[in-house]
Every structure is written in C-alpha cells, then in structure tokens.
C-alpha cells in the first residue's frame, strides 16, 4: 500500500472542473417525483402554513400547476386527495367521481403518456376517524381494509393512473391490490409500494395539509417502529414477493441506512420519500436565515440519491431542478 506523500487526495479537488468530474451522485429531473395535494373543496389555491411554498390545489388549477412541473423536466407526480366528505369507511376514496379520480382524468386527458401519474392509495384522508383503514372494535382491521384498498386502486386505474401507491401499511396490501387490478383488466398499472414506512413525527405537516391526523391513538399499530433496520428489509422483501414494481423507504433523510441496505439487497427500483417534516424544517431554518436553503436542499437530495434512491419524492422537486443544474 502506498500512502502519503505519493497519494494526495486533494489532487482530485484542485479545480472546479475536477471537483465536478469527481461528483457522482448527480440528480436528474427524471429522478424526482412531485407530490401534489388536490382539494375538492377549494376554489383557489390554499397555502399550507406548515409547508411554505406548498398549496392545496383546486381541480380547476391542477392542469396549470402540473404543466409547470412538466416544463421543469419532471416526469412524475404523486397525487393526494382532500375529499368533499369523510365517513367511517372512507367511501369517498373509491367514488368514481371522487377528487383523485377526477384529478387523474384531467391530467391524463391533457398530458397522456408524457406524464407518469401516481396516486396515493390510503384511507386516512377519507375516513372520519383519520386512520389508514377500517376500524373494528378499537383497532384497524387489516383484512377488512384490504378489500377497500383494492377498490380504491381499481378506481384510480379506471381513471387512468399509471401507478398506484399503497401507503396504509396493511399486511398483504400489495398482493390484494395486484389481484384486484389484474381482475379488473389493469395488468399494466404498476404498484409503487410504501414498503418501509416508519411511524414518524416527520409526517406532521402533511397531516395538517391533508387533514388526516388520527382522531384517537396513533399509527404505531401499522407503521414501523423506527428503531429496526431488519424489519424494514423484511417489509420490502415481502412487497417484492407480492408484486411491487417500485418499493419505497419513507421518510428518507433519517433513514439513509435503510435506503443503502435496500439498494444493496434488492434489484427493484427504489424510491425514497423526502417527507413534509423534512421539507418544513429546511424552510423554517431558511426563513430564520440559519441555513442557505438552496445549498441545504441540494446536499440533502444528493445524499438521498448517493444512499441509493432511484426516485426521490420531494416537495422541493421543482425548485431543486433549477438549483441542481448549477452543480
Ligand atoms: C397517508 C400518507 C402520509 C404521508 C404519505 N401518505 C401520512 C401518514 O402516514 O400519516 C406522509 C407524507 C409526508 O409527510 O410528506 N397514508
């Protein structure tokens, strides 16, 4: 082994151009997925106070908002719905004229295959109690929820979704959704599974945005305990066996170890969700003048890619595209 002084690592850092050729985990706009909240009750964009720069979009502004996203080079959006009514069983989630069904139709009519439309499949935004499934007794009933998740997925597919993204963390949800989609003839609609979804405080701002905070208890009966790496890998493995086309680790920034391990172990495209709380803390620090926002976002997204994410779902997507091109 030859060491110093024959070896000098700083030779590779001597000029800006050398730094640039040595910078490997570069983000491309097509790596990014832009999450969008669609609000059936809104007439004009409703700013989300805990997520500065993000809004709940009314259906009539959606196409315009997505047009700007496409122009920036981003190819995929992930839709979340705020419905006009909620009930115990979350029936507005699979209504043929529900908010997401209408949103998907609008986008597909306008953009066709130019855009990849992904939809969140869950119940928490649609149930009166705010849990991600059907309540029986005092808990979320796994198998009763599967039936509803299948219906939601098929209704999104009918509207034209390219990918459905189940996020409720019910056991067997990927298998059930695959069967439901195939049974209804939607063999080409893909599943992006929120496979390793941790019970995280970083979803706080999202729950304000989507009005999906549980009215009682918490989500630890279905989302994972954040202190366990091996359980996350097992969740991912099971989703692959059940037929997931893309698997996901969520949140991203506090879980880079899980992303790196999953990348090493599995050959399925890997998505990472840079969630609302991760967005809001950067925005808050930037507003205080404590962080350079552009530098922080560039470094964070690069770290998520370097850890192994093939796709990054982030509220920063549009801003990041312009900042990244300067690297
Ligand atoms: C819904 C869902 C949540 C997020 C994505 N899908 C919230 C939750 O599980 O409570 C969080 C996304 C974010 O924080 O940006 N099931």
Image (cartoon, rainbow, N blue to C red):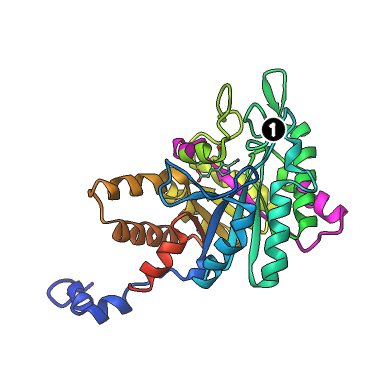
Q: Residue at x 67, y 41 (%)?
A: 83
Quadrant of the image containing the C terminus: bottom left
Return the residue nearer the eye: 6 or 295: 295
Q: Is residue 189 magenta?
A: yes
Instruction: Sort mark 1 into few (<14), some (14-19) or many (20+) by Cα contacts within 10 Å.
Output: some
Q: Residue at x 54, y 60 (%)?
A: 33
Q: Residue at x 72, y 27 (%)?
A: 88
Residue found farthest to the front: 43
Q: Residue at x 35, y 58 (%)?
A: 297
Return the residue nearer the eye: 154 or 246: 154
Examine the rendered structure and indicate whether residue 80 appears above or below residue 68.
above
Q: Is residue 12 left or right of residue 96?
A: left
Q: Is residue 283 magenta?
A: no
Q: Is residue 317 left or right of residue 295?
A: right
Quadrant of the image containing the N terminus: bottom left
Q: According to the image, label 1 marks what residue?
A: 86
Examine the rendered structure and indicate whether residue 102 appears above or below residue 114.
above
Residue found farthest to the left: 5
Q: Position of residue 267 (x, y in %)?
A: 60, 62
Q: What is the magenta range?
A: 176-204
Q: Position of residue 152 (x, y in %)?
A: 76, 45
Look at the image and tell me whether residue 161 can be seen.
no
User: Which secondary structure, mark 1?
Assistant: loop
Q: Position of residue 247 (x, y in %)?
A: 60, 54
The total number of labels drawn is 1
Ligand 1 picture quarter: top right
Q: Is mark 1 within 8 Å of ligand 1?
A: no
Q: Quadrant of residue 67?
A: bottom right
Q: Position of residue 106 (x, y in %)?
A: 70, 60
Q: Quadrant of residue 266?
A: bottom right
């Amino acid at each position: 082994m030859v060491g110093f002084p024959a070896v000098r690592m700083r030779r590779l850092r001597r000029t800006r151009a050398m730094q640039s050729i040595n910078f490997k985990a570069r983000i491309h706009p097509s790596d990014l997925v832009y999450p969008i909240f669609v609000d059936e009750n809104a007439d004009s964009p409703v700013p989300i106070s805990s997520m500065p720069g993000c809004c709940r979009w009314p259906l009539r502004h959606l196409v315009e908002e997505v047009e700007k996203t496409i122009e920036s080079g981003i190819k995929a959006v992930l839709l979340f719905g705020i419905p006009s009514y909620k009930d115990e069983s979350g029936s507005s989630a699979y209504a043929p004229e529900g908010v997401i069904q209408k949103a998907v139709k609008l986008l597909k009519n306008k953009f066709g295959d130019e855009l990849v439309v992904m939809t969140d499949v869950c119940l928490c935004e649609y149930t009166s109690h705010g849990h991600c499934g059907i309540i029986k007794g005092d808990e979320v009933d796994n198998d009763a929820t599967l039936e509803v998740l299948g219906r939601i997925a098929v209704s999104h597919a009918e509207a034209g979704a390219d990918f459905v993204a189940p996020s409720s963390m019910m056991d067997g949800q990927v298998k059930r959704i695959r069967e439901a989609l195939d049974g209804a003839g939607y063999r080409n609609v893909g599943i992006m599974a929120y496979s390793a979804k941790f019970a995280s405080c970083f979803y706080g701002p999202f729950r304000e945005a989507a009005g999906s905070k549980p009215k009682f208890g918490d989500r630890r009966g279905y989302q994972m305990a954040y202190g366990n790496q091996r359980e996350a890998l097992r969740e991912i493995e099971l989703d692959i066996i059940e037929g997931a086309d893309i698997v996901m680790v969520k949140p991203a920034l506090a879980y880079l170890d899980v992303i790196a391990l999953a990348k090493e172990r599995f050959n399925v495209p890997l998505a990472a969700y840079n969630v609302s709380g991760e967005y809001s803390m950067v925005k808050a620090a930037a507003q205080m003048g404590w962080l350079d926002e552009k530098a922080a976002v560039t470094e964070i997204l690069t770290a998520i890619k370097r850890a192994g994410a093939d796709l990054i779902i982030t509220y920063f997507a549009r801003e990041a595209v312009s900042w990244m091109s300067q690297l």
